[in-house]
Each structure stands twice: as structure tokens, then as C-alpha cells.
Image: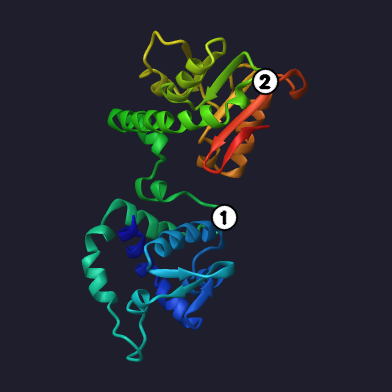
Amino acid sequence: MKSVALAVALDLRIADAILHHGGAATLSQILAEIGISQCNLPGLRRLMRVLTVAGTFDDGQEAVYKLTSASRLLTNNDGEGPANLSPMVNHVLQSFRDSVLSMGLTAWFRHDDDQPGPGPGPFVLFFGETMWEMAERDQAVNASVNDAMVAESRFLMRMVLEECSEIFHGIDSLVDVGGGVGGAASAIASAFPSLKCSVLDLPHVVAKATSGSNVQFVAGDMFESIPPANAVFLKCILHDWNDDECIKILNNCKQAIPSRDAGGKVIIIDHRYCGWI
């Protein structure tokens, strides 16, 4: 990831953008200097986070990014200061630049379809379809996604059940929306045997789920409807979709559960949040 991030930064001439502002620039200044759409500001922030962790740039107060001794070697300084090693680094990073990830990220940063809000992600721009669409037609991709989600659930749910188990108290039925082959739901059902758990996911996903467990599987689409339950569980779901799509999911969640006064819950576990609404 560090090498891919560096290859993208070289393509976007981020070091030159910072140099143009005297060696220290905010995200907005970098964005304007390299000429990419304002909607890509969050993506640029994540890219710069990787590069500061790698030591390529330095981040000061109020998200001001500064050149380091390393990144000064990547600037076109017209003979003033240290030599410009960008061509050499470009050569070394060529294999990363030719990778799907690097090409997808660079194209995404430069993509501007003049539409309000965020456009298609790097994956869609490169492959022409989402990962979920690819998984539906490619069994190898589907298996890879399912295995990855099970591994994540085993890692994450152990901590959730140890530190946030109270969010599951007071409910007798739960549907895990987009729950894959049931990794999270199985962990919840094991910790709370009296809790009736089910998993909603696309037909090609639940077709691979192991039968005979204490978790029921329902083939469906969370954008159309969600089976009724006392609580809806969303683990690492909402960050995959834009605001309008998240609103559609949450509206379907509201239709699936009783009112809050009657004990209905939408339980959200995501990268920076663990709780219920």
C-alpha cells in the first residue's frame, strides 16, 4: 500500500503542489493545485494519511502537510535544492503503477463526471462493475469475499461481544443485514442462545452458507426489504454505500423493526462506531 500510494502521489505531483505553497499546504490547497474534484477530498485525506505514516510527508497541526527530506527529492525544483529523483522512483515503482490498484486509484482521482456527489469508486472505474456484481458472476471472487468476511467477523465479533455485549440485551430476534455466510450472526447466537438470529444476503451468497447451524438464512436484497425482527444488525455495511443508498437501507431497517418504545433497535458496528439507534 505504501508503494502504491507513493506511485499515485507521483502521478498527481503532490510533492510539487506542496512545494508551490512554500513546503507546507492544507488538503484543500493540495487538491486545488493538482486539479482534482472537490468530492475526492476524503480520498486525498486517506492517501496522505498513508504517506505520512510512511514518512514521505509530515503532517502538522490543522492538517497542514509538509515536505520531508525524502519528499523534497520528488519535486521539480528547477535545479535549486536537492536533485529531483522522481524519474528514478517512477522507474522503481513501475510494477506497482501497472497494478490494478494503482491504475484504479489514479484514474479515480482524475475522474470528474461533473455530477454532484461522489462518483464511481476506483474498482468500478477499472473493472466496469462493483465487487458485489463481480462476485455474483464469478464463484472464485464470491468465495474470496465470503472467506474474508468470515475472518473479519471472527476477529471483530470477539471484541464486540466482550466490550459492547449490552447492545444485544433486551431483544429476542435479530436479522444480520448483508451478513454473508453468517460469521457474525453465529457468534451472536453462540453468546446469546435464546436470541433468534437470521442473515439476509443476496441469493448467491446465502447459497454458500453452511446449513445446520442455529442461524437461519434469507435470500433477498437489503435495498428492497428486510425481514421483520426485534433488531437489525449492520456490521461494516453503511461505509460501502453513498448517502442516498444508506438512507434507503436505514428506511428499510425502520420498516423491519418495532418502534424504539417497543424495543426496536438498529445495531451498527462500523470502523469508528459501535452502538445502536
Q: Please provide percent x and percent y for residue 242.
A: 56, 44
Q: Which residue is more in the foreground, 140 or 199?
A: 199
The residue located at (36%, 54%) in the rendering is 104
Reading the image, the residue beneath label 1 is 115
Residue 81 occupies quadrant:
bottom left
- Is residue 136 shown above or below 26? above
**Residue most toward the top?**
212
Reading the image, the residue beneath label 2 is 257
Give the quadrant of the N terminus. Answer: bottom left
Judged from the image, the secondary structure of the residue bearing numbered disc 1 is: loop
Q: Please provide percent x and percent y for residue 229.
A: 62, 16
The kind of residue tagged 1 is Gln
Give the quadrant of the C terminus. Answer: top right
Please say if the residues under marks 2 and 1 sit with CB atoms less than 8 Å apart: no
The kind of residue tagged 2 is Ile
- Is residue 101 shown above or below 273? below
